[in-house]
Amino acid sequence: MLDDIRRWLQERNIDEVEGLVPDTAGTARGKIMPATKFCKEEGMRLPESLFLQTVTGEYAEGIAGDVEHDMVCVPDPETIRPVPWATDPTAQCIHDCLHHDGSPVATAPRYVLRRVLDLYEAEGWVPVVAPEVEFFLVKPNVDPDYELEPPIGRSGRPETVRQTFSIDAVNEFDPLFEDMYDFCEAQELELDTLIHEGGAAQMEVNFIHGDAMSLADQVFIFKRTMRETAHRHNIYCTFMAKPMAGEPGSALHIHQSIVDKKTGRSLFANRRGGDSQLFRSHIAGLQGFLPAAVPLVAPYVNSYRRFTRYFAAPINVHWGYDNRTVGLRVPVSDPQARRVENRIAGADVNPYLAIAASLACGYLGMKLGLRPSKPVAGDAYKLPFTLPRDLESAIARMRQCEELIEVLGEPFVESFCAVKEAEYETFFQVISPWEREFLLLNV
């Protein structure tokens, strides 16, 4: 394995290597080192407490066990890529995290996804996923007290009206997207389409369907690529779920299907081309367990601002055929491409954890033989909320779901919930402008 990496680095005259570990938030942690040193190492050493670090840089407390030991971070040769924007020849490689005895670190997001995929493997099932990632381009914002604004495009003007699916609105940022495509091609990120979404300078990039771990890796790399590309054009790219008031939120939709490992045939369609019972059970699992898995697909206090009626985001776990108002949409397709689109996850997710959660819920539905509700043909926004409305209640619900804890692993769920609770407590100490505006002199 290390020989393959050495050969790859030597063939490209790589000087430097970025060793990457996706943390709980889905951002890149790790070390940068000379390629010669990287080739001599048996693996990076990083503290296991990395997975207890909150998005504010603090650490969650009160977790059982000793988390101060170092992990052995082992490079995955399938993930080595160039860093196309680097000045000197530089590579990046995603690492898996192991204990010194070779056992996996249960709190590592990449392992959590692998754990779920192993359950599918044991059944002879192969998940196929296709993520769709939404994001906003905004003016640089160096003072968090100021609201975000759309950036200036080639015309010299910001967007002021809805430009959904507009080609010309995308072309406003042609130089940026040309760099994005060049960087993604160099890293072998398999992008499909680029479209303008409903928000001001809000875009969506779709990925070609494929292996779940590979796609999680690609989304992880794409996020840092997109931020870097935007910086080079004096623009910010944000994957916040709800960055601007009055604008739609940003999602990470997950299309998912299952094929038979031996035959490659879709298990979501029966011999006559209709929905299979396994497909219906998969949807039922998503309906039954996604409300408990919401912290993994809506991980921050801001995430819940996206769940708003009539704002292009779901508020419940109803399902339907070609219905964009439901949380679980079944697109029109031929039988082999039969799939369900999970529309609940926000763009702010850790892609490993969001995909793991979505597949875990479907897996439980199939194993338990669950049956879904009737598909919704009308407007699901008129139906009641079935998703948690805030992070605190979502965490409590996740802690109570024994089936989900068993699939994802108790050590991970314990540490993840501790991180989210620490983040919530930090947020709760902040007094918002709304409170000062309406309560200061009126109560």
Image (spheres, grey):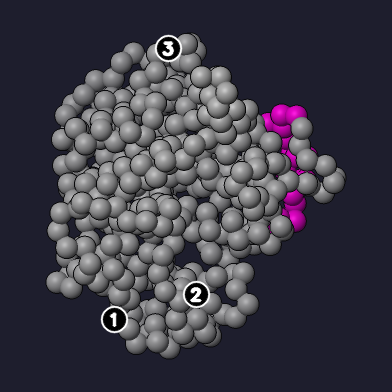
Q: Residue at x 76, y 37 (%)?
A: 159
Q: Is residue 104 left or right of residue 179?
A: left
Q: Residue at x 65, y 33 (%)?
A: 199
Q: Judge whether residue 138 can be spotted in this image.
A: yes
> Which comes before the other along the chain, label 3 or label 1?
1
Q: Which is more foreground, mark 2 or mark 3?
A: 3
Q: Which residue is mark 2?
A: 91
| Real-space CA distance between mark 1 and mark 2, rounded to the nearest whole angstrom | 17 Å
Q: Residue at x 68, y 62 (%)?
A: 232
Residue 252, above or below 245: below
Q: Is residue 75 a member of the stretch shown in magenta?
A: no
The amino acid type of the residue labelled 3 equals: Leu
Q: Which residue is mark 1?
A: 42
Q: Is residue 245 left or right of residue 120?
A: right
Instruction: Please state which of residues 94 and 338 is positioned toward the viewer in this rendering.
Output: 94
Q: Which residue is mark 3?
A: 383
